[in-house]
Image: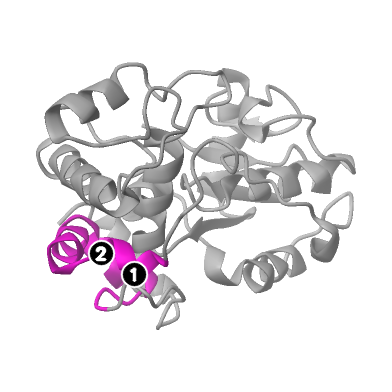
Amino acid sequence: MGFPGVWMTESASVMYRVVPKCACSTIGQILYFSDHGRYFDGDIHDARDGLHKWAREDSRPAITEAALGRETFAFTCVRNPYSRILSSFLDKVCGIQRNGNRYRGNLVPMLVARYGVDIGGPDGTRPFDQIASFRRFLLFARDTIRWRRPMDPDIHWSGMAGHAGTFVRNGGRFDRVIHTEDFAAGMGDVLSHIETPHRVDLSAVPRFNESAGHGPRRAHPVAAYFDDLSMHLVHEIYRRDFQIFGYDAEDAGRQHPVAPVDLDALHDALAEGDQ
């Protein structure tokens, strides 16, 4: 299976397992800058050179050697499951993507027809009840993750443990797992452990949130979107994410992790796969 979702600097100073909706655009740009002294002009996900990616056939030998050799510093970044699934909804379901179309073609029309999800009309500009619509979407996300129907789960709302686990089960080992809620400290720790051709000043890094303009702004605090039923659904589909990455499953409003990541326990859990 290899190492899907892994990016690595061309200097092999650091490798990163992408977890969608967890600051991946910013991290990719930081990695790019650390090698080239400039940011990629555009969405880093579109970069075809300047950064090793598993999706590039010519990058796979270098990534495989580095991952299995375990001499290249490896990390990933995670996010509170409550805010991550909500962000996925506002961006991917409610938003118009940068190509001017809805995400994944018939996905949104199917959600409207089969789950009664409201997305603000054809162009997304009409006011709608974000809370009610999100809770209907959450039923769909649960169906895709638990039963793979009416479609396979999308990478933006499938569990973080599943993404990170492929790296571990195929022979890699993480040196750090950082949290988006304390991004500056976590990314600073990563940079302090590696040597890069160009120094990165985190205080000067612009915001690289490529999804920021796609969908509507969140209209309410995160906790307001989750009643008892929707919290139960989140517990059901992201149980491992809460356990492994140290987030509080009982309080949707508590965004920061409540426990540090135990790397040994994390690798043991991820090596076991879905349980």
Q: Which of 152/10 is in front?
A: 152
Residue that mark 2 sits on: 226
Q: Coloured how?
A: one colour
Q: How far is disc 1 from disc 2 in space, using C-alphas?
A: 6 Å
In the image, the segment drawn in magenta is 221-250
Q: Are marks 1 and 2 in contact (CB under 8 Å)?
A: yes
- Whether residue 176 is visible to the viewer of this picture, yes or no, is no
Residue that mark 1 sits on: 223
Instruction: Classify residue 203 as left or right of residue 263.
Output: right
Residue at 61%, 31% (x, y): give it.
45
User: Which quarter of the figure has residue 175?
Assistant: bottom right
Q: Tell me if residue 171 is in the magenta stretch.
A: no
Amino acid type of the residue tagged 2 in the rendering: Phe
Q: Which of 43/227 is in front?
A: 227
Dot 1 falls on a residue whose secondary structure is helix
Q: Tell me if residue 241 is in the magenta stretch.
A: yes
Instruction: Classify residue 170 as left or right of residue 187.
Output: left
Residue at 73%, 50% (x, y): give it.
13
Q: Quadrant of the N terminus?
A: top left
